[in-house]
Each structure stands twice: as structure tokens, then as C-alpha cells.
Amino acid sequence: MQHESVKKLFKEQVRHYSHKDQYKHSPLTQLILECLKNKKTNKKIEICEFGGGAGQLLNEIGKVYPKANLTNVEIIDDYKSFLTSKKVRFVNSSVLNSNFSDGSFDVIIMRDVLHHLVGRNYKETLYNQTLALRELKRLVRPGGVIFIEELTNESEVATRIIYYLSRLNFKIGLSIPSLFVISYVIVAFLTSTKLLNLSSSVFGEKNIKTQMLAVETKWYFQIVHLFSGLKKVILVVKK
């Protein structure tokens, strides 16, 4: 079960996540476009992004790879009004319970979603994160590929503190936007090691290719993350 804060966050931030250039900041973008551009096939392929905002990345994929059916899955229906292209099919659902049939997609994308899958407690949150990865595995077709991008905090202690402080703040209601402190945001970051171990347990280590990128942050973002090292972890999973 998801905490009530998750839908509140994405409803409040619709315009932010629907900005036309939002996808460009993702290090995963070029990797996906190059992979699809080099993929030769005469058939239509099914591509899905979970948490795709207004479908900005899917729209770019459609330009490079016109032989694709594009599906954007968001938990808030409001994003449908901001879709960047009519070619992108919008589905109001969740990666925790998508209701798609097994093997629905050739390509699945999920960017910076895992740390938002908070539950009623930390144990349920970790279960949600695991469940999301299992859902991706269920939905990808044989020979398909899953692209995952996730921001990680390299201190296990810091991830726990951030999680519990953000839960506390949800009740207190403190808001300091300049420091990324927002009353309706609860986050549960994984360390890169924990993310890799979790992914390996679901997909199998041999099926995963990994890239880790250092993240340069401003001083106020470092404060929020308790001065712990941050990384962008890119996982490419082939079935």
C-alpha cells in the first residue's frame, strides 16, 4: 500500500514534471535513444514508461523510432491534460499494480520512481520497491529490455534519517522550498549497493548492466542529503 503523500506530491507537482525539457536532465535519455535507434525490426514495438510525467521522453523516442506504440503510466490523471503528443497513450495506474497482462512491453522505462514508493512504514516501503521491480520483470517480453534510473544516497544511516525526518515533516507541515523541504514529500532513498542487491535478487545479476554517475549538487541539496555521497544509478536489464 502506498502512503497518501505519494499522490499528493505528484498532484501538486504536475506542472513541474510536465515541463517540456524535464526529460533532458536524465542521463538515461541518450542511452535509450541510441539503443532504440540501433534496434532493427520491422514490427511495431511496445514501449512503456512508468512515471513519465507528460510523456516528454516518450515523445522524443517516437521521433527517433516511429515504429513504436508509446504508453505513459501515471498515478495522477491530471497528467493526461499535459501530454506532449497525441501519439502517447495515457494510462492512469501504478507500477505497484498496473493491471497490464504478462509480457505487455518490449521496452520499459522507470526514472527516479523507486524512492517515492513509500508505504505506511519502512518495511512496507522496501516491499513496495521490490514489488515494483517484480512488476517490471513480469511486464517485459522475452528479448525485451528494462531501463531504470535511480538517485541513490550512499549512506545507509542517512537514508534512514531522511526517510523518518520526511515522515515527521509530513505531520508537522514545514515547507522550505529552497531547501527541498516540502511538507507532502516523503522519500526513501536506497544506497547504490542496496539497489543493486535488490535488482539482482529480482532480475538475476547476469542480466543487469550497470552505470554509476557521480552527482554534482548545490550546497542546499547536500544539506538535505546530510552531506552523503549521491549517485545516479543506471540499470539496463535484458530478459
Image (cartoon, rainbow, N blue to C red):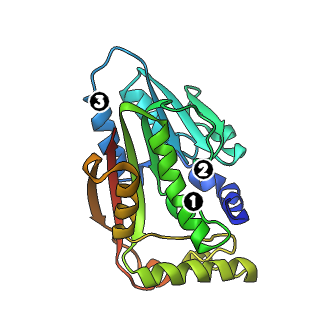
Which of the 4 quarters of the picture holds residue 201?
bottom left
Residue 23 lies left or right of residue 54; in this view the side is left
Q: Answer few, some or many: residues within 10 Å of disc 1's Cα (few below 14, many 20 plus, some between 14 and 19).
A: many
Where in the figure is residue 5, as x and y percent of width and height? 70, 65
Residue at left offset 62%, top offset 71%: 186
- Number of marks in the rendered image: 3
Residue at left offset 59%, top offset 30%: 89
The answer to whether residue 185 is seen in the rendering is yes
Q: Which residue is mark 2?
A: 96
Kindly identify the amino acid type of the residue bearing the numbered disc 2.
Leu
Kindly identify the amino acid type of the residue bearing the numbered disc 3.
Lys
Classify 81 as above or below 168.
above
Q: Secondary structure at mark 2?
A: loop
Where in the figure is residue 95, as x and y percent of width and height? 57, 47
Q: Which residue is mark 3?
A: 37
Tag 2 near tag 1, CB within 8 Å: yes
